[in-house]
Amino acid sequence: MNSRTFDAGAVLGLDLSNFQNAAARLCDDMLRTPLLPYFGNGALGHVVLKAENLQPGGSFKIRCAANVASALAPVCNGRMATASVGNFALGLARASRSRGIRVSVHVPDTAARIKVQGLEHLGARVVEHPFDQWWAIMTSRQTGEDDGIFVHPVCEREVIEGNGTIGLELIEQSPEIDTVVVPFGGGGLASGIALAMRAAGSSARIVAVEVETSTPLASAWRDKRPVQVIKSPSFVDGIGSTRVLNDMWPLLQTLIDDVVTVSLADVRDAVRSAAAHNHLLLEGAGGAALAGALKYPSERVCAVLSGGNIDMSALAEILGPALP
Amino acid sequence: MNSRTFDAGAVLGLDLSNFQNAAARLCDDMLRTPLLPYFGNGALGHVVLKAENLQPGGSFKIRCAANVASALAPVCNGRMATASVGNFALGLARASRSRGIRVSVHVPDTAARIKVQGLEHLGARVVEHPFDQWWAIMTSRQTGEDDGIFVHPVCEREVIEGNGTIGLELIEQSPEIDTVVVPFGGGGLASGIALAMRAAGSSARIVAVEVETSTPLASAWRDKRPVQVIKSPSFVDGIGSTRVLNDMWPLLQTLIDDVVTVSLADVRDAVRSAAAHNHLLLEGAGGAALAGALKYPSERVCAVLSGGNIDMSALAEILGPALP
């Protein structure tokens, strides 16, 4: 296994051309997703939705994954390994297939079945681990196997560049956006969007949103350093961890302007409202972004709807009991 | 009540500028909806989706309704009446509110509850009728009340112009589309798209799709004239009738190239697949378009996803039992 290192300082130094080049590399792998007005009853027209749930594979992760596959294809000898709750791995499996790269994916045993099935359908090799062991792979970059160059789903320059392409699109689609609410998993999405928007001259606030079941960033924010937290299981499987990654903390301190926490009930309401009013399906992380945007005071706030890969049975349960 | 007449010959004579002018009038009322690749498992990349379910009010009807409201506002004396299963009326209520017009909506008692609630929420006056009485209003343009100028949801020049703006967008978004599959309700959507695309020089086939529970067009096609058919109730409430409107038949004969019928099971599968793979919520009519496109042999076929206003309980039932 080849281990790569992550240089936060170099990432903080990325400039506009890095993100523009990534956007050019990715245009055949992904959609330029629409920016849609939110039509929920309570909204006053100030909330807009970046519909990354409409991407191939159902999440923004195709952006960072395709950028990784494109950049590393010449040096990976046809094999890559990653550790991911699913969406990054889905993107990597998809982007790697057309480039002749075999992907091994290490997932926590809490990953949504629909994501595991999707990985297998795309030809990836899937290895399940108890959550703590999986988290150890995330922090050590050691899978314990000889399964190719290890690609981290968050702490990689190419990941952050790929995610930043969302920021470039937001500025083009609606320069008046003053606040961007981003679901917080490991920080790769928020960091990429923040870096790209600032490189392009925007002063929009970047707000990270967490769900009450797992608040590593709010805790680190309070204590001014990464600390261990409890992660309770829930249908929100795309974000949440037990600790902010040490490698990411220097970026997060610099790039994120505020942190908000939403409840599981808020997320359910947001998923139901996006379905009923905008006819978009969201997974929990996407619902968290909308819930955060609805709570955050702003003239024009964008919720980054990170993905839509929710188990149909979980969705049916959210939609079923209460008519909107 | 003021009755207006419908001149099919004049509508057949609409030229490109009529549709371009409508598009310019409507830009503040509606979205230019994205054209998205279909990501379902069985697809080979040749199916694209015109996501009209993402429109304000959840259906393409905002286009024709806003064009009507915009054109008739100066002459309607602040009142309009219509007969609609819901989506046209929702659009008219929405577009009329900002223009100070009070709308009365005559609906069949089979209309989805979510649409009736939406109308009332938008301030419209709703009058329910048994289906046969409602259909009599549709054909006679007589509501039996003094409730303003009557606007037909299908047989109006302004309706067909507004719907045609979809065709202009399709040509710009993907000139290589060779087939457009359109759900058939009264024929206003298919006619508008066909007229606009031909006016713009396209030779794409226009295929109308019906559900097995109501096939007035397939029956008229076979008998070369409108005939009475049975309409069985189902969750597909946005399309289907007991007879092709006489006023529309000259247009349909000229503009529609083929008619396909899909089963209710096909529609359910399409609704489930659009949710699972594209994270888009469709109502039955939208599902019928996708089901039709999946059956229709073509190099590049576009399904017009006409709307997303499905009862959440019906949706939960479709999504719940079988995991994709």
Image (cartoon, coloured by chain):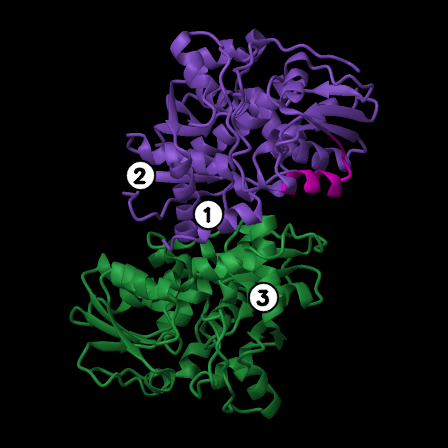
Chain colours: A purple, B green
Q: CA distance from mark 1 to mark 2?
A: 26 Å
Q: Are marks 1 and 3 in contact (CB under 8 Å)?
A: no
Q: Is residue A120 magenta?
A: yes
Question: Residue at image x 61%, y 89%?
Answer: B222
Callout 2: few (<14), some (14-19), or many (20+) C-alpha neighbours within 10 Å?
A: some
Q: Chain of mark 1?
A: A
Q: Amino acid at mark 3?
A: Val
Q: Chain of mark 3?
A: B
- The residue to which callout 2 is attached is A46
The quarter of the picture where the N terminus of chain B appears is bottom left
Q: Is residue B288 left or right of residue A217?
A: right
- The residue to which callout 1 is attached is A318
Q: Please state the horizontal and vertical placement of residue A225, each as a whole percent of the image.
A: 46, 7
Q: Quadrant of residue A121?
A: top right
Q: Amino acid at mark 2?
A: His
Callout 3: few (<14), some (14-19), or many (20+) C-alpha neighbours within 10 Å?
A: many
Callout 1: few (<14), some (14-19), or many (20+) C-alpha neighbours within 10 Å?
A: some
The range drawn in magenta is A114-127
Give the foreground label among 2 and 3.
Answer: 3
**Helix, strand or loop at disc 1?**
helix
Q: CA distance from mark 2 to mark 3?
A: 35 Å
Q: Could you confirm whether marks 1 and 2 are on the same chain?
A: yes
Q: CA distance from mark 1 to mark 3?
A: 22 Å
Q: Is residue B150 left or right of residue B252?
A: left
Q: Please state the horizontal and vertical placement of residue A200, each as a whole percent of the image.
A: 46, 22
Q: Could you confirm whether marks 1 and 3 are on the same chain?
A: no
Q: Nearer the viewer, residue A54 or B19?
A: A54
Question: Residue at image x 39%, y 51%?
Answer: A277
Q: Is residue A165 above or below residue B9?
A: above
